[in-house]
Amino acid sequence: SQQGEEDPQALSIQEGENATMNCSYKTSINNLQWYRQNSGRGLVHLILIRSNEREKHSGRLRVTLDTSKKSSSLLITASRAADTASYFCATDAKAAGNKLTFGGGTRVLVKP
Amino acid sequence: NAGVTQTPKFQVLKTGQSMTLQCAQDMNHNSMYWYRQDPGMGLRLIYYSASEGTTDKGEVPNGYNVSRLNKREFSLRLESAAPSQTSVYFCASSFQGNGEKLFFGSGTQLSVL
């Protein structure tokens, strides 16, 4: 069963614009992580936010977490063509035996 | 620094054939995982190994077996492949497990005809 559900499923933007994607989950979590997957490649870890944190930054990435709404968002600012990829949220929840559970992903296309 | 290495990258099997997917990590990680990725389904955990000598079932273990050969290597075996096992398989590792960030291999694309 999928703990995290990303929205939208796909996103197309122009280079330089911001990209925002959301992740909703069902049960209490210890942390939430975001990963990027380029076409035909493995997933790469981007950022981890713990349940007691509300916002975290890493370069052009900004992640927020709202545990009351059981949701997180990933914002990519000033997008580049190289940001074209699929983005996945993954939750670490006690209910899942502290094993990461991944959502279905958001496909982002950044047009030059 | 190779990270997580998976072999093979591509494989085509006929229904009923068997094969083993190999995975090795050189980061001295204790925990290793096998996921499968299907369109629109995200990644689903097949089996994991929290530490050398232990293995446990994940969300979708049916039709698979695993071996944690040593701390570096974790293999996934399909004893009698079925078309439903057509998927992309990823191996991953983490230092201690328990919700830490994962390091992924580049995947094996498997087709079962």
Image (cartoon, helix red, strand yellow):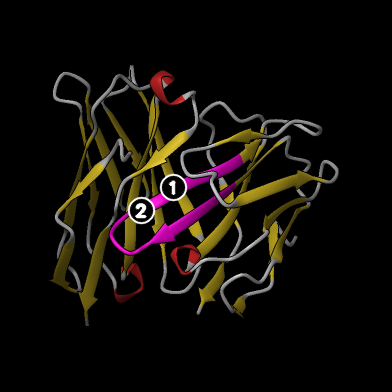
Q: Where is A78 relative to B50, above or below?
A: below
Residue at the spot x=67%, y=59% of the render? Answer: B79
Q: Position of residue B25 (x, y in %)?
A: 74, 52
Residue B87 seen: no
Please name the residue that numbered disc 1 is placed on: B44
Which secondary structure, mark 2? strand
Q: Which mark is residue A58?
A: none
Which secondary structure, mark 1? strand
The type of residue carrying mark 1 is Arg
Task: Indicate the quadrant where residue B1 lies.
Answer: bottom right
Over which residues does the magenta segment extend? B34-47
Which quarter of the rendered picture does the N terminus of chain A lie within?
Answer: top left
Q: Position of residue A59 (x, y in %)?
A: 37, 50
User: Farthest residue toward the right?
Assistant: B70
Q: Where is B80 relative to A99, above or below?
A: below
The type of residue carrying mark 2 is Gly
Task: Indicate the quadrant where residue B108 lies.
Answer: bottom right
Chain letter for the residue marked with disc 1 in the picture: B
Query: Contact, CB < 8 Å: mark 2 with mark 1?
Result: yes
